[in-house]
Image (spheres, grey):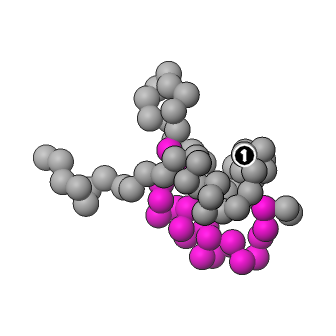
């Protein structure tokens, strides 16, 4: 049974970039290095991706003040 609280809030890449304040390339590099939560594909063979909001907000609160998008 579906309930709104059972599924996580998802953010688009554009929303994540505005919250984090860096470029797409930097975001990709941080993901690849394991320094930022990875995007999830919406469907197996899709190019559409979303980020789990909770993971992004945790990164901002835990690591955002220590790491900048420039490092």
Magenta-colored span = 50-69
Q: Is residue 59 left or right of residue 49?
A: right
Counting labels gives 1
Q: Is residue 25 left or right of residue 51?
A: right
Count neighbours of disc 1 (C-alpha within 10 A) and say few if under 14, some if 14 to 19, many if 20 or more. Answer: few
Q: What residue do we see at 48% from left, 52% from top?
A: 11
**Residue 64 percent across, percent down from the top left:** 69, 72
**Residue 15 percent across, percent down from the top left:** 55, 53
- From the viewer's side, name the closer residue of 13 and 4: 13
Task: Specify whether residue 54 is painted magenta.
Answer: yes
Screen quadrant of the C terminus: bottom right
List the single residue furthest toward the top.
45
Q: Which residue is mark 1?
A: 24
Q: Secondary structure at mark 1?
A: helix
**Residue 18 percent across, percent down from the top left:** 62, 58
Task: Specify whether residue 67 is painted magenta.
Answer: yes
In the picture shown, does residue 8 fall above or below 62? above
The image quarter in which residue 22 lies: bottom right
Can the viewer see residue 27 in this picture?
A: yes
Q: What residue do we see at 63% from left, 76% from top?
A: 62
Q: What residue do we see at 62% from left, 70% from top?
A: 60
**Residue 19 percent across, percent down from the top left:** 60, 63
Q: What residue do we see at 61% from left, 67% from top?
A: 59
In the picture shown, does residue 32 fall above or below 5? above
The image quarter in which residue 24 lies: top right
Q: Is residue 24 left or right of residue 43?
A: right
List the single residue furthest toward the left.
1
Q: Is residue 3 left or right of residue 13?
A: left
Can the viewer see residue 33 in this picture?
A: no
């Amino acid at each position: 049974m579906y309930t709104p609280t059972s599924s996580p809030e998802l953010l688009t890449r554009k929303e994540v970039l505005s919250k984090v304040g860096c470029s797409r390339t930097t975001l990709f590099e941080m993901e690849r290095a394991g320094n930022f939560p990875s995007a999830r594909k919406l469907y197996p063979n899709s190019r559409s991706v979303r980020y789990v909001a909770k993971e992004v907000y945790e990164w901002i609160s835990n690591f955002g003040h220590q790491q900048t998008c420039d490092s």
